[in-house]
């Protein structure tokens, strides 16, 4: 071989080495600064274990929809974490996850010597390597630490970008409740957020489409069932399947407040428990309901009464109903019981007039026992005169007048004080009938009437005794 030929061959070899070094140091970057994941990254059997690790570590951090992270990793590094898995990239700091070798470092931010690229599978970039580790810690150099920090990062951007999401739990619930499908509105919102906040290409439809297609690809690569992972916990109202039974927010007890008619109940809807506000109290009514919301049913309902006297009846609210009030039937008025038996509002009415009836009957007996009243003497109810009559044979005077033998009083009728004389043969007192010369029909209101008439009750008793004595005396005379 000539010297010229040898020199040319050496020159070609040097050019080839330079070219190899160039391509080994620079990653295949597309027009928007992304790694061309169609031709680079993990391949074959190495991909499934990496996807499984993303799924499990994300689930432990609360993100059960781990395919969302896998889509990001596919776009950023093709699922690579170590430089040994993507030797076209720059070398980052060493990691135990890489056998002590370097993690992958981004190659789109300048020459590798500047150490300005993102670190690990999710390409965390705080400036240069030193600044990134100062911000995020060396945990991002491990595979699991890189995945955990990726969860924290997407939780933060969802909190900032999604209305109604204000904390970590709500951000996780929003992502876990997402359906990975082209037609799902939440998924469409998600990839637009990634294009802006993860890649810096706000409003870029093509960058959003890149995240969308990568996520759909890794989902179909291992099947949708692969991504259904759940760490069972107590179900709470958060839009997630916490207890891993395939149902979201199931078995969440409703919340109630207030009592009676004011009681209200709210339930978990859309991952949120509505605020429970009690109703307003109303007036209590007899309806079996606690209308005034004091914890008591039909309290303070006044009883209803109807009728008067012995007919009066009262009903109350029982079992939520007020019974019909029906007065009792009236009966004949009974005297002396202090009750309004006939229910006309008056007690023992008519009983005063009836009290005189026995006295009228007693007067009738006088007429039966002796001579007619016309034969007795003047009908003045008093004394007939100074001398009502004299007896020829010295016997008792029928007219209660003067007696020759008995020594009757000289003034028998004048003052009406000594109406009785001693009978000549027996010494029995006799009654001057002229003092009680009253027809049976006249022993009524004037002499023996009700209280308030002349004489009153005492007069009635005296008159009855006098009439009885007259009848007894006449009866004895007949027997003689």
Image (cartoon, helix red, strand yellow):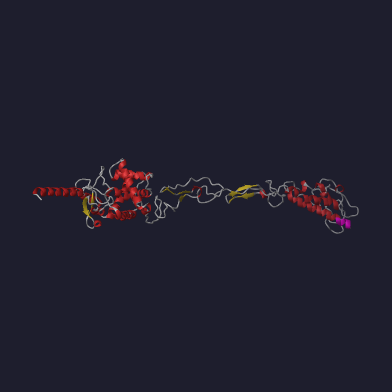
Residue 210 visible to the viewer: yes
* Name of the residue lying farthest toward the left: 3
Tell me where residue 426 appears, x and y as whole percent. 85, 59
Tell me where residue 141 appears, x and y as whole percent. 25, 54
51 up-or-down from 206: above or below:
below
Q: Is residue 145 left or right of residue 471?
A: left
* Name of the residue lying farthest toward the bottom: 426
The residue closer to the viewer here, 203 or 322, is 203
Residue 438 visible to the viewer: no
Tell me where residue 369 appears, x and y as whole percent. 85, 53
Q: Which residues are magenta?
A: 475-479
- Give the main secondary structure, helix, strand or loop, of the magenta stretch: helix
Q: Total number of numbered labels?
A: 0
The residue closer to the viewer here, 413 or 342, is 342
Q: Is residue 60 left or right of residue 15?
A: right
Q: Quadrant of the C terminus?
A: bottom right
Tell me where residue 87 appears, x and y as whole percent. 22, 52
Magenta highlight on residue 478: yes
Q: Is residue 5 left or right of residue 382?
A: left
Q: Is residue 320 left or right of residue 421?
A: left
* Name of the residue lying farthest toward the right: 392
* Name of the residue lying farthest toward the front: 1
Magenta highlight on residue 417: no
């Amino acid at each position: 071989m000539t010297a010229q030929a040898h020199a040319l061959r050496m020159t070609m070899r040097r050019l080839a080495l330079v070219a190899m070094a160039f391509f080994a140091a620079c990653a295949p970057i597309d027009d928007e600064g992304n790694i061309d994941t169609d031709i680079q990254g993990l391949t074959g059997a190495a991909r499934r274990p990496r996807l499984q690790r993303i799924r499990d570590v994300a689930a432990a951090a609360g993100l059960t929809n781990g395919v969302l992270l896998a889509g990001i990793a596919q776009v950023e590094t093709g699922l690579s974490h170590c430089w040994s898995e993507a030797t076209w990239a720059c070398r980052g700091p060493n990691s135990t996850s890489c056998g002590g070798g370097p993690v992958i470092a981004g190659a789109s931010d300048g020459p590798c010597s500047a150490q300005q690229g993102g670190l690990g599978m999710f390409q965390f970039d705080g400036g240069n390597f030193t600044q990134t580790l100062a911000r995020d810690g060396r945990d991002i150099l491990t595979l699991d630490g890189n995945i955990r920090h990726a969860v924290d990062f997407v939780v933060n951007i969802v909190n900032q970008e999604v209305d109604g999401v204000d904390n970590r739990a709500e951000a996780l619930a929003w992502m876990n409740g997402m359906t990975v499908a082209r037609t799902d509105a939440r998924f469409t919102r998600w990839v637009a957020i990634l294009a802006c906040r993860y890649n810096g290409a706000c409003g870029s439809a093509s960058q959003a489409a890149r995240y969308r297609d990568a996520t759909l690809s890794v989902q179909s690569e291992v099947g949708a069932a692969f991504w259904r992972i759940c760490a069972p916990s107590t179900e709470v109202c958060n839009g997630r399947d916490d207890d891993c039974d395939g149902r979201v927010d199931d078995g969440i007890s409703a919340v109630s407040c207030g009592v009676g008619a004011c009681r209200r109940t709210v339930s978990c809807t859309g991952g949120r428990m509505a605020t429970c506000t009690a109703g307003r109290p109303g007036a209590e009514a007899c309806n079996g309901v606690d209308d005034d919301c004091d914890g008591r049913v039909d309290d303070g309902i006044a009883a209803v009464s109807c009728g008067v006297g012995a007919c009066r009846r009262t009903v109350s609210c029982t079992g939520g109903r007020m019974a019909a009030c029906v007065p009792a039937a009236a009966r004949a008025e009974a005297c002396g019981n202090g009750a309004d038996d006939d229910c006309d509002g008056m007690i023992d009415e008519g009983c005063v007039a009836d009290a005189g009836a026995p006295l009228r009957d007693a007067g009738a007996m006088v007429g039966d026992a002796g001579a007619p009243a016309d034969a007795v003497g003047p009908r003045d109810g008093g004394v007939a005169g100074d001398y009502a009559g004299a007896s020829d044979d010295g016997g008792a005077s029928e007219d209660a007048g003067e007696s020759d033998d008995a020594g009757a009083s000289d003034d028998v009728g004048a003052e009406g004080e000594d109406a009785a004389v001693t009978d000549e043969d027996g010494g029995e007192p006799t009654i001057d009938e002229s003092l009680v010369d009253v027809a049976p029909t006249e022993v009524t209101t004037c002499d023996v009437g009700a209280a308030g008439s002349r004489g009153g009750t005492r007069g009635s008793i005296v008159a009855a005794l006098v009439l009885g004595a007259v009848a007894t005396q006449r009866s004895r005379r007949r027997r003689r």
